[in-house]
């Protein structure tokens, strides 16, 4: 077993188990904490994929900023606990069957189709693609217009969030 | 790259469908919202996987923009949830049906 495989199994297990635990907890606060654990595991997976910049951004933006916002709103509103399988159990079982069937379809498609990029990827190119220099260069040359648009989107979202949370709508 | 690309894709598909199951089964608006974030994350994992295996940074740039949009979406969505909670004093999406007729 190579180191990459061991790390993949470790972080993949953390991500998968914490995702399942997240949707089954009755307390919203504990769900949010499991989602943070899931994002930390994903950040480790990004590191095994040589995507250093995205791994750091994942921790700072998702686990840091977005989840703090979620935790803040949960603590502010204190939603009531819901018992997981007591309400509409048939609907839930149906939803799980649907999700399981779609997952099996995905597994079948992934293994049958053999994704076009094989396992003989060039490791040096992969490491180079994930560095902050390469991403920064791309961001300020080829992707400068989407980058500016993202800035305006964040400004609009900030103003929208303030307006929405401020006024009482009828 | 000693791990087959299929492993990452299957993990990503699994997380996406856990998110789908969360959206379909949970009735708490905030948890539904967190399940949507989980689905966005699994899509990000697919993008980074292909980007890394192809040695091309375009996928990682897309992940960067997806994160920006997710941050904007979380801010606006949570503001909407706060506004609804102020109005109806509940977060149960079965009781929030003002858009139904």
Image (spheres, coloured by chain):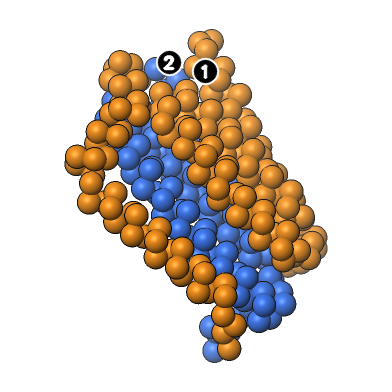
Chain colours: A orange, B blue
| Residue A89 appears anywhere in the view | no
Q: Is residue B94 above or below residue B24?
A: below
Which chain is disc 2 placed on?
B
The residue lying at 70 percent from left, 59 percent from top is: A74
Q: Nearer the viewer, residue B65 or B17?
A: B65
Which chain is disc 1 placed on?
A
The residue lying at 47 percent from left, 25 percent from top is: A47
- The Cα–Cα distance between marks 1 and 2, rounded to whole angstroms, is 7 Å
Residue under circle 1?
Answer: A5
Mark 2 surroundings within 10 Å by alpha-carbon count, few (fewer than 14), some (14 through 19), many (20 or more): few
| Residue A58 appears anywhere in the view | yes
Q: Are marks 1 and 2 in contact (CB under 8 Å)?
A: yes
Q: Position of residue A157 (x, y in %)?
A: 44, 63
Q: Position of residue A77 (x, y in %)?
A: 72, 66
Q: In this image, B60 relative to A5: left or right?
A: left
The residue lying at 53 percent from left, 45 percent from top is: A62
The residue lying at 55 percent from left, 50 percent from top is: A66
Q: In this image, A71 relative to A98: left or right?
A: right
Q: Position of residue A134 (x, y in %)?
A: 28, 29
- For residue B2, the mark is 2
Q: Quadrant of residue B80?
A: bottom right
Q: Position of residue B62 (x, y in %)?
A: 33, 44
- Please, what secondary structure does the residue beneath circle 2 have? loop
């Amino acid at each position: 077993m190579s180191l990459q495989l061991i790390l993949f199994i470790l972080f993949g297990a953390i991500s998968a188990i914490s995702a399942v635990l997240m949707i089954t907890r009755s307390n919203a606060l504990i769900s949010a904490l499991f989602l943070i654990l899931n994002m930390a595991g994903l950040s480790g997976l990004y590191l095994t994929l040589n995507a250093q910049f995205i791994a750091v951004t994942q921790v700072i933006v998702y686990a840091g900023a977005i989840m703090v916002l979620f935790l803040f709103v949960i603590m502010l509103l204190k939603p009531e606990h819901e018992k997981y399988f007591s309400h509409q159990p048939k609907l839930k079982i149906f939803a799980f069957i649907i999700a399981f069937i779609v997952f099996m379809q995905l597994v079948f498609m992934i293994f049958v189709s053999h994704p076009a990029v094989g396992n003989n990827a060039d490791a040096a190119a992969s490491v180079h693609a994930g560095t902050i220099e390469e991403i920064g260069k791309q961001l300020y040359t080829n992707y400068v217009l989407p980058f500016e648009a993202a800035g305006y989107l964040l400004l609009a979202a900030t103003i929208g969030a303030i307006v929405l949370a401020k006024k009482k709508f009828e | 790259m000693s791990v087959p690309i299929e492993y990452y894709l299957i993990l990503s598909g699994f997380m996406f469908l856990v998110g789908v199951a969360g959206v379909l089964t949970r009735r708490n608006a905030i948890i539904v919202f967190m399940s949507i974030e989980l689905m966005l994350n699994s899509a990000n994992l697919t993008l980074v996987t292909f980007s890394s295996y192809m040695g091309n940074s375009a996928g990682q740039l897309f992940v960067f923009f997806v994160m920006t949009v997710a941050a904007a979406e979380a801010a606006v969505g949570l503001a909407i949830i706060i506004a609804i909670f102020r109005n109806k004093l509940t977060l149960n999406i079965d009781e929030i049906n003002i858009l139904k007729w």
